[in-house]
Amino acid sequence: MKKVTVLLVEDEYDFGFILKQYLEMYDFNVHWYQNPMKALDDFSIINQCDIAILDVMLPQMDGFTLAKKLQEKIDFPFLFLTAKNQQIDRILGLKLGADDYISKPCDPEELILRIKNVLNRKGYKSTREEILIGSYIFKPKQLILQHSNTDYQLTEREVSLLLLLTQYNNQVVTREVILQHVWKNTDYFTGRSMDVFISRLRKYFQNDDRIKIQSIRGVGFHVVFPVD
């Protein structure tokens, strides 16, 4: 299963080191740069990233300028780190497409939740060509789920649903989260449609009994996607 990869640009060594360690503890891949120019130069690295966390006050280039230059290379969501009580042009950040602001020093657990919320709002999609789910190979860009010599052609909505579920491996995802991020609607009939799609995914995965999308009545689904 692909981990979420974070581009972290923070020039303060102690804070950046702690933040990197904490993100990795929560199973994120982290590419940390103290120098924004170096981050821009490493296109092969930033092309692997799913989200960026940028300090506003950086040497050589502020976070807003860095965000604008990054957007010229790749499209991913980003959050700004700001010093407590720091006066910044939040309107400029919003115009650039900032997804959130976080004050330093921040509560690491709050940061983790904010990252997950941003990715969920964006309908996070893996940048990798293939995602391993047990004995299956999921190819989201090709709309294919592959097992042995069999290819299951997926619909775009099935792909969106499966991508969302991969973010919740060994966790519970609520019905509301799925409906909001895949169907953009939470009414009764949409909920019934979601149940049909969940049933389809279970049928696709019937050849590997380790893979589970377990219903939790009144809550949602517990997802178990083993990684071979």
Image (spheres, rainbow, N blue to C red):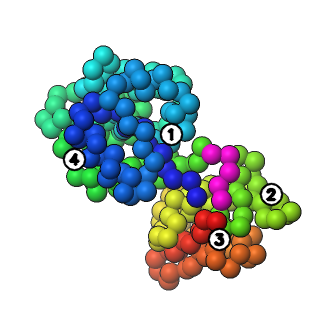
Which residue corresponds to mark 4?
106
Residue 49, labelled with which disc?
1
**38 and 162: which is toward the camera:** 38
The kind of residue on which mark 2 rests is: Gln
The image shows residue 140, relative to residue 8, as above or below, that is below
Report the residue at 76% width, 75% height from top: 207
* Comparing labels 2 and 4, the label whose residue is closer to the camera: 4
Principal secondary structure, stretch drawn in magenta: loop
Write the start and end of the magenta stretch as one range. 128-132
Please identify the quadrant where the N terminus is shown.
bottom right
Q: CA distance from mark 1 to mark 3?
A: 29 Å
**31 and 66: which is toward the camera:** 31
The image shows residue 47, relative to residue 180, as above or below, that is above
Residue farthest to the top? 60
Residue 153, labelled with which disc?
2
Please identify the quadrant where the C terminus is shown.
bottom right
Kind of element beneath mark 4? loop
Q: Earlier in the sequence, mark 2 or mark 3?
A: 2
- The answer to whether mark 1 and mark 3 are in CB contact below 8 A is no
The kind of residue on which mark 3 rests is: Ile
Kind of element beneath mark 2? strand
Q: Earlier in the sequence, mark 2 or mark 4?
A: 4
